[in-house]
Image (cartoon, rainbow, N blue to C red):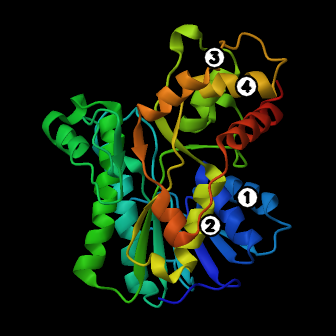
Amino acid sequence: MPAIKPGSLVLVTGASGYISSHTVEAFLDQGYNVRGTVRSTSKGEYLANLFKDKKGKFEYAIVEDIGKDGAFDEAVKGVDGVAHMASPFHFNAEEPEELFTPAIQGTVGVLESLKKNNPNVQRVVVTSSVASVMDSNMKPPHTFTEKDWNVVSPKECEEQGKNASGQAKYRASKALAERAFWKFFSDNKPPFDGVAINPPLVLGPIIHQCDSPESLNTSVAVYYSWLKGEKTEKDLPAGGMNYVDVRDTALAHLLALTVPEASGERFITGNGPVSGNEYVLEIARDFPDLKNIPKGNDDASFRKKLNTEAIIHDGSKATRVLGLKYRPVEETLKEMGQSLRERFNF
């Protein structure tokens, strides 16, 4: 599959989201033109204004419900590549289907729309997650790779239904949606190919429309609670989750559409574990004026122990095949904190 060249038109679904807005920016900065799907005109206009001076041109299309049949029929026309990023991320679903329906039908729907209205598209990249890779029963230390699949969460949801945990419902939605993605290619053998990006916890600055802390996306909201002094020493070290900078995940989507060798592959974009302990240490260094921040443990051996006794989502394949280089955690946390303080003026 040839690389998609600058000047091509790329469809980014769910373009107003945290990761997707950065992905739109990454494409525009490299000279690609972007059509982003959004749920309302106000969201589209926000992005149009945000990206008005970029190298590439931005336009938007309204898709109010990604779970509806034919939702993407018009949006896919004329595009050279697709980054399908629209999918819910929260742990508050009452019934599993609240997450399953938009995740699965949205993914299959965009592929069906391409098959019907734009079979000459070159490649589709889907935003999956390490949620579709991990086994929540696995104890650290352990390393997951792209060869692994989450079969635990779908089973929990199948057996327990609405009584399954919120995390299991979300993780199952990602695993089932990615399974459906690959099944479409196996069953239909379309002329275009596919790639999956599987990020862990995504951190970094916000550029999307977010008018209040209450509307922050899940991953950044957790960091915000540390930044605002809403947690105490009792919450530490709160360690172990793997992370990636939002801008690195955005670049991974661009590379996945443009690197020929990415065809048919999954890519974990993991940059290693990060803990609440690292959060508070970085906050103390970068924002010494903030009050009520828990005191972290700066002992090198303690910090190393936190990282070595963790679950690892191995992101080396993305570096090896895509050429992705990860930002250091200090840069990610500092610039996330700066963007939150600027946005919410505290």
Mark pair 1, 2: CA separation? 9 Å
Q: Position of residue 16 (x, y in %)?
A: 63, 54
Question: How many C-alpha atoms fall within 10 Å of the one at disc 4: few (<14), some, or many (≥20)?
Answer: many
Question: Is disc 3 in contact with disc 4, using a CB cutoff of under 8 Å?
Answer: no
Question: How many C-alpha atoms fall within 10 Å of the one at disc 2: few (<14), some, or many (≥20)?
Answer: many
- Residue 194: image quadrant is bottom left
Question: Is disc 2 in contact with disc 4, using a CB cutoff of under 8 Å?
Answer: no
Quadrant where the image shows the C terminus: top right
Badge 2 or badge 3: first in the primary sequence = 2
Mark pair 1, 3: CA separation? 38 Å
Which residue is denoted by mark 1 in the rendering? Answer: 47
Looking at the image, residue 8 lies above or below residue 137:
below
Mark 2 lies on a secondary structure that is strand
| Residue 43 placement, left or right of 263 | right
Front-lying residue, 212 or 239: 239
Which residue is denoted by mark 2 in the rendering? Answer: 36
Badge 3 or badge 4: first in the primary sequence = 4
Mark 3 lies on a secondary structure that is loop
| Residue 296: image tag | 3
Mark 4 lies on a secondary structure that is helix
Q: Is residue 72 visible?
A: no
Q: Amino acid at mark 2?
A: Gly
